[in-house]
Amino acid sequence: MHEESQPRPAGGLLFWGFIVTVMAMLIVIQRGSKGQMPVPVGTPLPEMLAAGWLNAPTLPSPSALANRIVVVDCWFMDCPPCRTAMPDLAELVATYQPQGVAFVGLTPDSEQELAPLKEFVDSIDGFTWPVGYGAHPTLDMLGIQIYPTVIIFGSGGSAIWSSHRLRGIESVLDRELAALR
């Protein structure tokens, strides 16, 4: 006899899809922890495209960023590690901005989330650098998939370092600044 096959419940497919997604994320995180940078060295500094800007009247122009060391912080408001890093990033800005390093924040947070975004930015002492919100085009050009991601672009306009943490950023900035002197 031939048994009729019963359709499988969709839940089984969802379960296995979830498992595959989690495993893929773990592979990405594991690779990132083995020294591979989230944004490859040599990636060019893209144009800073965003729906709007906080802490700046207009977007930072390519000419304003040319021949400068640029730190780009990719974050979003509901990301706990992103929020935790902000006071440390503010200290970096206070130390390195007077030495000519440019800092730019990029977030996918939309214009609809502008009020809480502005409230968060205002709540961090020293959060003075420009933040582009609705920055999907630039984040996509950089291939950002995990937040936070911090990238240093050297004075030549290409990525020289990136990480999901701030650990090690000071030594890279110090080395780059020394090379410019």
Image (tube, rainbow, N blue to C red):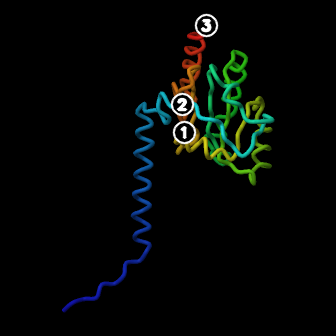
Tag 2: amino acid: Pro
Q: Quadrant of residue 120?
A: top right
> Residue at the location (41% across, 40% down)?
30
Q: Nearer the viewer, residue 151 or 5?
A: 151
Percent across and percent down for residue 46 are 59, 34
Q: Residues within 10 Å of mark 2 (few under 14, many from 20)?
A: some
User: Circle 2 — which element?
Assistant: loop
The tag earlier along the polypeptide, 1 or 2, is 2
Q: Residues within 10 Å of mark 3 (few under 14, many from 20)?
A: few
Q: Is residue 20 above or below residue 128?
A: below
Tag 1: amino acid: Leu
The tag earlier along the polypeptide, 3 or 1, is 1
Q: Is residue 177 above or below residue 160?
A: above
The tag earlier along the polypeptide, 2 or 3, is 2
Question: Marks 1 and 2, how far apart in space?
Answer: 9 Å
Q: Which residue is mark 1?
A: 142
Tag 3: amino acid: Arg
Please identify the quadrant where the N terminus is shown. Answer: bottom left
User: Circle 3 — which element?
Assistant: loop
Q: Which residue is mark 2?
A: 44
Q: Which residue is mark 3?
A: 181
Percent across and percent down for residue 47 are 63, 35
Question: Marks 2 and 3, how far apart in space?
Answer: 23 Å
> Residue at the location (49% across, 36% down)?
38
Please identify the quadrant where the C terminus is shown. Answer: top right
Q: Are marks 1 and 2 in contact (CB under 8 Å)?
A: no
Percent across and percent down for residue 66 are 64, 23
Q: Is residue 63 left or right of residue 128?
A: left
Q: Is residue 129 above or below residue 30?
A: above
Q: Quadrant of residue 104?
A: top right
Percent across and percent down for residue 83 are 67, 40
